[in-house]
Image (spheres, grey):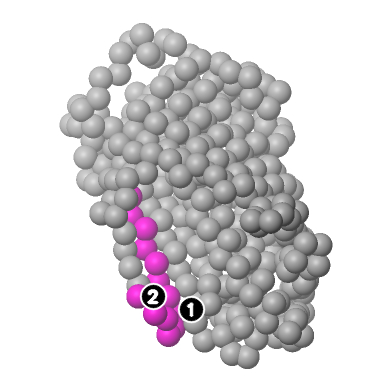
Amino acid sequence: MLQTFVYYGSSPNPNATFAATISQTVTDVGTKPFDGAHPYDLNVNEVDLSETERQTVTTDAYVAMAPYSSTQNGYYTYGYTSTDSSGQSITDLFADVTNGNGLLDILPESAGAVWSNDAAQTIAESEADGFTSKRIVAAGGTYAETDTYPQRSQSSSPPPLIATIAENADGSGTYDTPIFGSRKQTFTYSAPASGTITIRLPGAIDTVKQWYTLPLYVEHDRDEGAVAIPAACRVPAKYGSTGNGIDEQFTRVDTVFGTIESFDQLSYVVGGYAVCTTLSDTTQIFYDYSGQGDEAPNGLSFSGGTSPLELATFTSTTGLGATNVSGAARGRSPLAGSDARGLSLRTAFLAIVERRRFARVHRAAIRLRSISLAGSH
């Protein structure tokens, strides 16, 4: 697993690449109730070991088989739960599963088959310090989010600070960030007009060139047929040199936080098992809320064009090594005939990506609140 950060400009933080080694134990624990359904639970216990930290993550991916057509089944995800060693917990519930969403594969697999999903889901997060967040994403990629920040005092119990974020289908959006209690400052982001976006800050207005295109969410999934397995997967020779490639891609735009995220998963399936899975998530960041760049005159940095200020890339390659897969395991559930292992890797990866987004949200909240406080004096 590699994480790469590139800052295009003057910054005290240099470009950097961080490497980690992943070890996972994946267990099919059978069916469990989840969001009104009874899908299978794939439990992933993961340890990420880097030069600076050791993190453990427990993720449960909920999947099921359902008819896709009169002759084919669909392999669907209902969502996941994920908890890490820092006390951060995430629950992701997919909406409209089997009805335009949640489809991961069509079985039996057929080269050239194509499909897509919408963006509808609800993501809830909580942290050890009491922070909570809930983001409701509509099918087209718009969302409404509520973030609750706990406040502490030695002499009293102040109410939490509530921030709300909304992104609209035309690209416009608002971010209401609290200063004290119910007092808020609103940041607004206009829909593009004549190639520009107007951003209204506390006491200031800025304009930037349009850096994104609509729609906010696009997904393309395809069965690529037989493809060569990369050498980096280190797959044992007994699985051969090719696998059936299941490629899943999506792009989503966040017009409030100024990001374009591109996700790509390619699973190489041999004999019903994903013998290798490569995952990539690249986020182009056009609005810098970190406070580390050239922020004059408004306290924030905007790219001012179609080139991002920052580029964060996260990649993972996981191959099936010297592993024994027993016949008994193959018969435990209908998932054995699909790339269930690929889903467990996808889910654990997306949970890490979601944690990365929450870290950006935290940085933005701190920065926007400091700007609001400075402007209130």
In the image, what residue occupies the spot 53% across and 58% down?
A: 359
Residue 32, placed above or below residue 255: above
In reply to whether residue 272 is colored magenta, the answer given is no
Q: Is residue 220 visible?
A: no
- Give the CA distance from mark 2 to mark 1: 8 Å
Residue type marked 1 = Gln
- Crowding at mark 1 (Cα within 10 Å: few <14, some 14-19, many 20+): few
Residue 153, placed above or below residue 36: below
- As rendered, which of 70 and 101 lies closer to the eye? 101
Residue 215 is situated, as x and y percent measured from the top left of the image, at: 69, 60
* Label 1: which secondary element: loop
* Label 2: which secondary element: loop
Callout 2–callout 1 Cβ contact below 8 Å: yes
Residue 308 is situated, as x and y percent measured from the top left of the image, at: 51, 75
In the image, what residue occupies the spot 37% across and 63% down?
A: 4
What residue is disc 1 on? Answer: 292
In the image, what residue occupies the spot 56% across and 55% down?
A: 358
What residue is disc 2 on? Answer: 13
Q: Is residue 250 visible?
A: yes
Magenta part of the chain = 1-14
Residue 285 is situated, as x and y percent measured from the top left of the image, at: 53, 69
